[in-house]
Amino acid sequence: MNSAMMVAQAASTIVGGINLIGTVELNDDGVTTTASDAAILSQVSTFWNALSGVDSADDPSGTPAAFPMAVPPPPTFGDR
């Protein structure tokens, strides 16, 4: 996979993030956004933290910042 393909795949995920929903439009001239560079960087950071396991919420049992749903508990495998 080349860099251009990876960027295209990551871009659709990032603009679908909760911090950017409603800021992106697809029109005849291409993609336009009303999001600032800071808002886009914030969304990238939010996803990075979620993927790396960093919890930025005050309440660890609460809803994480990256996704609008609570994270399920890890599976248990008996008495290992």
Image (tube, grey):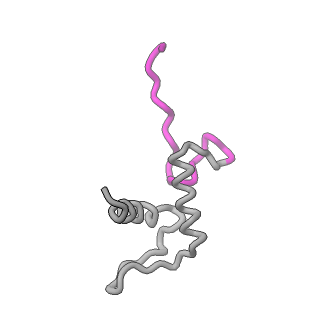
The residue at the point 57 percent across, 50 percent down is 49
Occupied quadrant, residue 54: top right
Front-most of residues 21 and 40: 40
Q: Residue at x 63, y 41 (%)?
A: 60
Q: For residue 29, what is the image quadrant?
A: bottom left
Q: Position of residue 63 (x, y in %)?
A: 57, 48
Residue 38 part of the magenta segment: no
Give x and y (percent) for residue 39. Answer: 58, 69
Magenta segment? 58-80
Q: In screen coordinates, is 43 left or right of 32? A: right
The foreground one among 74 and 47 is 47
* Most distant residue in the front direction: 2
Q: Residue at x 54, y 62 (%)?
A: 43
Q: Would you say the magenta stretch is mainly helix, strand or loop?
A: loop
- 65 falls in the magenta region: yes
Q: Is residue 66 above or below residue 40?
A: above
Quadrant where the N terminus sits is bottom left
Q: Residue at x 69, y 47 (%)?
A: 58
**From this viewpoint, which residue is outermost toward the top?**
79
> Where does residue 15 sit, x and y in percent of width and height?
45, 66
